[in-house]
Amino acid sequence: MCIKNHAISGFIKKKNMVFSKYNFLFESSKYGCLLYNSVSNAFIRLDRNSFEELKKIEQNSTLINKLSDSSLKKLKEAKVIVTDDNQFFYNKRMNFYFNTFDAVNLGLAIAPTTHCNFSCSYCYEGSRKPIYMTPEVEKEIIKFIKRYERVKNLNLTWYGGEPLMGFESIKRLLFDIKEISDIKLCHHTMTSNGYLLTREKSLFFRDYPLTCIQITIDGNKQAHDNRRTLAPNRMPTYDVIVENIEQFIDLNPDTRVAIRANLDHSNSETFIEIFKELSDRWKGRNVIVYPAFVKDFQSLNRETNKDNFAANGCRDICFTTSEKMQFFEKLHKKYGLEVNFRPEYTVGGCGATIVNYFVIGPKSELYKCWNDIGDENFIVGNVVENKITNYELLSRYIGGPNMMDDPKCCECKLFPICDGGCAWNRHKNIFNGASMQLCSSRISNPEKAFELYYEQLIK
């Protein structure tokens, strides 16, 4: 009787089991049959019989009953076989909305000016009027921060334009923020072109330390000076930027310096050169050099921006998602760079989808996304007036469509390791009829991405 009861119990347990929808079964031309689970990050190499058996179980979960106890145990540990395939989704959605409605943290991206001293070939901000923040607006920003009585932590980013062109505003604002006793400045960053990062400014940030500063260098000296020139006479900028970074690192060794190379097909071949040059130059320092890709704004409006590179110029030279994966594979295999192909769990969302996050323009206007700065159609409120003026737009960003209610996202096998893509892109696709890419290169080309990850696991 006892044996019989155990047998019945085991049958019931197997009967309630399902093949997780977060399993990714595929055949690699190099490594044969592979199984990846995006919840546990487990990777299993299978023989042909096991692969075919699991493919059948994927279609019919009752076949789990035919698995041996030892096989079932291993598959359960890897979360390949689960009792409730929806629980992970519930957990991630809960964490997503915890972030959305977090009341302890306040995130602000402040643009002290929309003016920029550069004339970059791919810039989408070129048409913005050069406006500078006034001391009166600065005072209103401090009042705005103080109104968040429940907030304990401030995450602050300086943006532009070129934020260092509004350096006096930055100094005054940081001095006043430091005087707010109830709020701690936890994360302090800046996105700059680096040209105006003089010794005076680097010394200032010793007293008001930056967590990270992002500076763009687009490939080697020749490529960079062809793309990122000083306005209005298109003078070169590379040498000044590199010397400024050198000086900043010496004075601010604890600040992470993130050197970003914006790439397309016209300069991508120069990335490895600048990576090696700067990595060797600042070896052992708090510096990272990484590639990014020029965004395809062509997908926004193909008709009204025919002559605008930033909107239409990507037709031939911007990377597709599959080309991005090929680029990373080349860096890893041809040049031996340590590219991390390991997927990571991510909750998703960004500042645009968080209630306590705003972008503040120089005229005191409030936006939800960096990309909206300077466009009056996307102002959601005003610091001086202390009110939201566009609830419709605000609700679209925060309460509107996201990965949690997108059927394609929710049913995707890689949902656990996806952030849902750019909220601004999604907003444009749904409300403006654009065709912006949401899926990352890993999600768009999973077989190649996971094959590269598997190679790293077995080496």
Image (cartoon, rainbow, N blue to C red):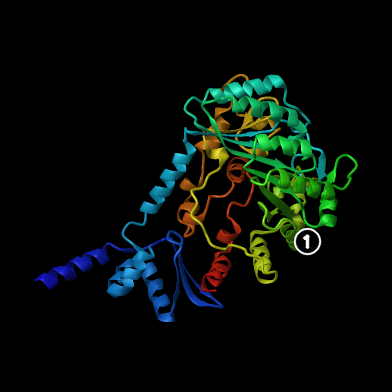
Q: Which quadrant of the structure image shows residue 360?
A: top right
Quarter of the image with the N terminus in it:
bottom left
Residue at far right of view: 233
Instruction: Measuring from the top left, give residue 62's x and y in whole percent.
Output: 30, 68
Q: Mark 1 belongs to which amino acid?
A: Thr
Residue occupying image coordinates x 53% and y 77%: 31
Quarter of the image with the C terminus in it:
bottom right
Drawn side of residue 194 relative to residue 424, left or right: right
Residue occupying image coordinates x 53% and y 29%: 183
Secondary structure category for the residue under label 1 = helix
Is 323 situated above or below 97? below
Residue occupying image coordinates x 76% and y 28%: 131
Does residue 295 appear in the picture of this structure? no
Instruction: Measuring from the top left, give residue 408's x and y in whole percent.
Output: 50, 53
Does residue 256 appear in the picture of this structure? yes
Residue holding disc 1: 270
